[in-house]
Amino acid sequence: MAQLVTRPYRTVRSGGERDTLEHMFVYIIKSIKDGSEYVGMSDNPDRRLTEHNYGEVKSTKAKRPWKKVYVEELSNRVDARKREKYLKSAAGRRFRKSIRAISSVG
């Protein structure tokens, strides 16, 4: 099992920064521990994956470590939130299942 260490710092953002960002990302990560998936959105999916793996996200802390499965870029926060909600719906779960099928072919 991968060794997890605590992170020496936490990224702090100013209050207005989130509203001025142009692009957002919706991502799917998979637990290496038990194979479960998590769908989220962020302006920086690589940083967010690091936060998941360092246990800084309460809902994913118990299932660490995580690996990135899918990332999609959207033009704004509203569209990203809509896509995130879709990926968490029944139709979105079917889409996620098709991604798993495609990624396991190679």
Image: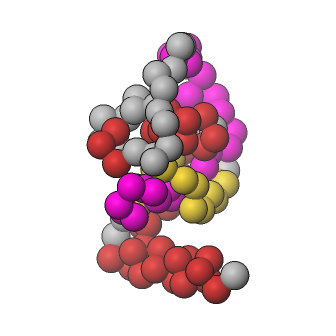
Could you say where residue 91 lies in the image, as x and y percent from the top left? 39, 79
Seen from this angle, which residue lies furthest front? 1
Which residue does the image show at 56% across and 77% down from the upper left? 99
Q: Say if residue 12 shows up in the picture.
A: no
Q: How is the image coloured?
A: secondary structure
Is residue 23 highlighted in magenta?
yes
The quarter of the rendered structure image containing the C terminus is: bottom right
Magenta highlight on residue 7? no
Residue 63 horizontal side relative to residue 96, left or right = left
* Residue appearing at x 40%, y 45% in the figure: 64
Residue pictured at 69% horizontal, 39% vertical: 22
Task: Relative to 21, say whether 26 is above or below.
Answer: below
Note whether residue 97 is visible.
Answer: yes
Between 26 and 69, which is closer to the camera in this rendering?
A: 69
Query: Which region shows up in magenta?
Result: 10-36
Q: Foreground: 33 or 69?
A: 33
Q: Residue at x 51, y 20 (%)?
A: 7
Depth check: give the residue in front, 100 or 22.
100
The quarter of the displayed image where residue 11 is located? top right
Residue 60: x and y in percent read 35, 44
Which x, y percent locates residue 52?
Answer: 46, 39
Quarter of the view holding residue 13: top right
Q: How many marks?
A: 0
